[in-house]
Image (spheres, rainbow, N blue to C red):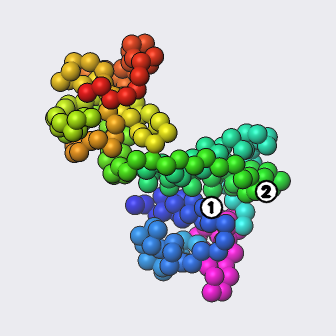
């Protein structure tokens, strides 16, 4: 990791903490030494960052010097907070971490009078999800992003397991479950797969032959009005 990237990552971590955070915690999050943290803090200060140090408590970013203020009304702020809060409950650690990062960035760019509203908003979205392998969920998102085929062992309603080669192009978050929309080579058609029923998954290096947007549009036209229950 280059030092410039490390400095940006450190700045982002400081944004995420509303209270002082120790050099030890920052070092563990960034996987660097505490000595490097202290050096990087001084570098950021020299570049204009207002970072306070409290003895025994740690460091706190008081004013973000990189991001300009943006304007949002009360309803827009509530909508964003509600959506990001919902992300904190989904079984996907990467998206949970991303929601925390986005909230910290938002707090950094809002005018002071809007920051207070952001911190005081009490709208909440709470979901209870069926247990899934969070690493597997992240793999599915990665496959969709990269538009590569995946190989899965899938258990249907009767617990019959079949091996499939899929072209994953969309994920749907439905109440208590996550559903994958994909083209199934075995069935030669669109199918829906509950993530909690995928027993094993491996990423292929092979791109599927269409863009995910094209597959999504075809699926939307043919399947969106049908039930999203598993029909495999």
In the image, farthest residue toward the front? 158
Q: Quadrant of residue 141?
A: top left
Residue shown at 67%/79% (left/top)? Answer: 53
- Tag 1: Cα neighbours inside 10 Å, few (<14), some, or many (≥20)? many
Q: Nearer the viewer, mark 2 or mark 1?
A: 2
Q: Is residue 62 magenta?
A: no
Q: Is residue 3 left or right of residue 180?
A: right
Residue placed under numbered mark 1 in the picture: 15
Q: Nearer the viewer, residue 154 or 204?
A: 154
Q: Tell me which segment is drawn in magenta.
A: 42-61
Q: Nearer the viewer, residue 140 or 108?
A: 140
**Residue 98 can be seen, yes or no:** no
Vertical position of residue 143 compared to residue 99: above or below: above
Left/right of residue 71 with respect to residue 164 in the rendered view:
right
How many numbered marks are there?
Answer: 2
Q: Secondary structure at mark 1?
A: helix
Residue shown at 72% from the left, 53% from the top: 122
Residue 91 sits above or below residue 2 on the image: above
Q: Is residue 144 above or below residue 77?
A: above
Disc 2 designates what residue? Answer: 116
* Left or right: where 4 falls relative to 202: right
| Extreme-right residue of the structure | 113
């Amino acid at each position: 990791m280059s030092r410039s990237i490390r400095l940006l990552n450190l700045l982002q971590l400081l944004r995420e903490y509303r209270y002082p955070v120790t050099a030890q915690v920052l070092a563990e999050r960034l996987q660097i030494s505490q000595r490097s943290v202290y050096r990087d803090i001084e570098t950021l200060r020299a570049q204009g960052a207002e970072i306070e140090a409290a003895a025994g408590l740690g460091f706190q970013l008081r004013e973000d010097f990189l991001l300009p203020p943006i304007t949002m009304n009360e309803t827009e702020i509530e909508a964003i907070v509600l959506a990001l809060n919902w992300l904190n409950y989904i079984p996907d650690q990467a998206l949970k971490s991303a929601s925390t990062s986005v909230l910290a960035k938002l707090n950094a760019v809002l005018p002071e009078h809007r920051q207070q509203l952001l911190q005081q908003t009490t709208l909440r979205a709470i979901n209870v999800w069926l247990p899934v392998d969070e690493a597997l969920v992240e793999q599915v998102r990665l496959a969709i992003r990269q538009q590569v085929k995946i190989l899965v062992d899938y258990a249907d309603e009767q617990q019959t397991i079949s091996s499939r080669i899929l072209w994953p192009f969309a994920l749907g978050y439905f109440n208590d479950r996550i559903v994958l929309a994909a083209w199934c080579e075995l069935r030669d058609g669109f199918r829906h797969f509950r993530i909690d029923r995928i027993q094993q998954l491996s990423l292929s290096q092979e791109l599927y032959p269409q863009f995910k947007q094209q597959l999504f549009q075809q699926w939307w036209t043919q399947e969106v009005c049908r039930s999203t229950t598993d029909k495999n």
